Amino acid sequence: MTETFKKIAFFTAGTDEACQALSVIEPQFHSVPLDQADALIALGGDGTLLEALHAAYIHRKPVYGMNCGSVGFLMNPFHLDNLQARLQKAQAVSIHPLVMTATDRSGKKHQATGFNEVSLLRQTRQAAKLKIHAGSVERLPELVCDGILLSTPAGSTAYNLSAHGPILPLSANVLALTPISAFRPRRWRGALLPAHLSVRIDVLESEKRPVSATADFTEIRDVTHVEIVQSSEMSATILFDPDHNLEERILKEQFMG
């Protein structure tokens, strides 16, 4: 990138490690509120980066993550050498969030965004029963399961991968629809959907088998149906060191044992 990042806002996980990192890094920059910043530096793990993205995309500020957490798949390594130069040379990746509109049993609609995924999970001991539409066509009349999630390529290595879903290259322009502990149909492993398709998930027997819906870290309880679409207008920008770019990391992850 050619920008000069002189004014920086900071976002930390609040852990001892992240706070200590902040105390060392902050004096190197002109620290300002987010709306006045050239970029946002996030210190923590992938969860911290997600929170930072939600804060930054409203102000159209890029986010540069530095790993002070446990996983940090979406983060750059933490070291202080030539940090200003690293920011200027960083590669920008734009990601588009999923927009979830969830309707609860009272009929109230709730909207939230997810840069990683939107997930539906059973709230009680009984399995959820779900009906799935993709592109306005009913694709699965009944799925008995613990839940289901729709993942973006950027989020495909997170919860989606843990649920045995596929890893998606950033350029694939598809979303992963992945069941969580599917009981019936037993052999259904999910689907890859074109990113422009809308998805609707209806909760069957919603009073007997309550289900919650979550977009990243925003949870809505007792939903009756959820509509999900990937936004073409909203986007967030993540900055990566040239030797630590996200596309290459996603490719490498597919060959991990």
Image (cartoon, helix red, strand yellow):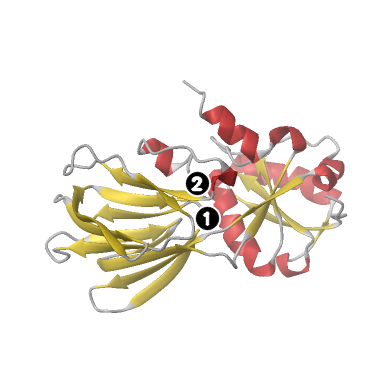
Left or right: where 5 falls relative to 132: right
- Identify the secondary structure beneath mark 1: loop
Q: Where is residue 166 in the image (x, y as percent from the top left)?
A: 43, 37
* Horizontal side, residue 145 vs residue 35: left or right: left
Mark 2 surroundings within 10 Å by alpha-carbon count, few (fewer than 14), some (14 through 19), many (20 or more): many
Q: Distance between the residues labelled 1 and 2?
A: 7 Å
Residue reaching furthest to the bottom:
107
Q: 188 and 241: which one is in front?
A: 188
Numbered tag placed on residue 247 in the rendering? none
Query: Does residue 115 appear anywhere in the picture?
Result: yes
Q: Mark 2 points at which residue?
A: 155
Dividing the picture into quarters, in which one does residue 55 lie?
A: bottom right
Choose between 71 and 157: the one closer to the eye: 157
Q: What residue type is labelled 1?
A: Phe
Q: Which of marks 1 and 2 is nearer the N terminus?
A: 1
Mark 1 touching mark 2, by CB under 8 A? Answer: yes
